[in-house]
Image (cartoon, rainbow, N blue to C red):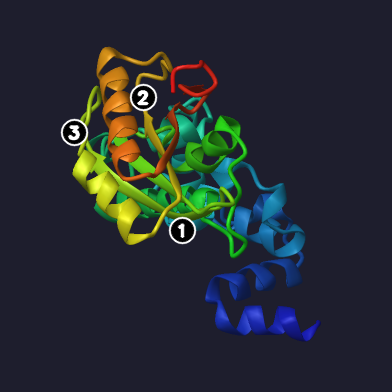
Amino acid sequence: MNSHLSEILLNDPDALRIADHTASGKAMRDMDSDAQPREKALKHGCSILSTSELWAIILRTGTPGFPITSLARQLMAANQDSLHRLERRSRAELLQFKGIGITKAIQIEAVLELTRRYGSEIPDQLPKISGAKDVAALMKDRIGNLPHEEIWVLLLNRANRVVAMRRTSTGGSVASVFDLKMILKHAILEDAGSLILTHNHPSGNTRPSPADDSITQKCKKGCEALDIRFLDHVIVTAAGYYSYSDSGRV
């Protein structure tokens, strides 16, 4: 047994129990169903696991007569095996699933929040924005699938590299409050050479509304007064985006 595996077994009682099963000659199918995903991960890595098996490892334990593997399969089946659909579940909806209490509901929320942060994290090398496609790629994981609207501003230096990202407001499912003063304040504090406005449409429809048109023009005029370049307003959804600049409206 190599030293790395020994360390895993010594520090994880579950892994030790799995190893004991294996050593005694029991096949995986004969093991406790809760242990099967962990055994697969230990032997082959997490990349081979299904999404429901990954959830089983994270949530760990089921209830008497209802193992965590069954709970995880039910959870994903009810969401058509889509993490995007699961992400939009409220806590109250999660609690309706058999075997999910407040602790497991918060665990699910925490994992989904981590995936959003990972997908939208700015690397050490500041990303360069060459067009709306770059904005959508940067913001999709952060806001594209949210069930409520959020308005963000991307602040760029003269080389069009992002120096800061700021959420300026959070709203409901159809609208959020536009705060021009807050947006311009962030731009001044970061000494931004230019900025891009972006927000999401929970409906999934990328078409801009009259209110979107209005805040675009207000932001453009505010930037002109401060000699800050207003580059674009990008509406982001889980499936696509709309760019005022690409549409010739900036």
Mark 1 Cα-neighbour bin, 10 Å: few <14, some 14–19, many ≥20 = some
Of the residues shown, which amino acid type is indicated by label 3?
Val
- The residue that mark 3 highlights is 177
In primary-sequence order, the first of circles 3 and 2 is: 3
Residue name at image x 75 percent, y 72 percent: 23
Residue 144 in the image: state x and y as whole percent.
44, 33
Q: Is residue 67 visible?
A: no
Mark 3 and mark 1: Cα distance apart in space = 41 Å
**In front: mark 3 or mark 2?**
3
* Kind of element beneath mark 1: loop
Is 203 or 175 nearer to us in this picture?
175
- The residue that mark 2 highlights is 201
Decide: is 25 above or below 173: below
* Kind of element beneath mark 2: loop
**In front: mark 2 or mark 1?**
2
Q: Is residue 197 visible?
A: yes
Mark 2 and mark 1: Cα distance apart in space = 35 Å
**In front: mark 3 or mark 1?**
3
* Kind of element beneath mark 3: loop
Decide: is 238 above or below 129: above
In primary-sequence order, the first of circles 3 and 1 is: 1
- Viewed as shown, does residue 77 lie left or right of 125? left
- The residue that mark 1 highlights is 60
Is 78 or 186 nearer to us in this picture?
186
Mark 3 and mark 2: Cα distance apart in space = 14 Å
Q: Which mark is residue 28?
A: none
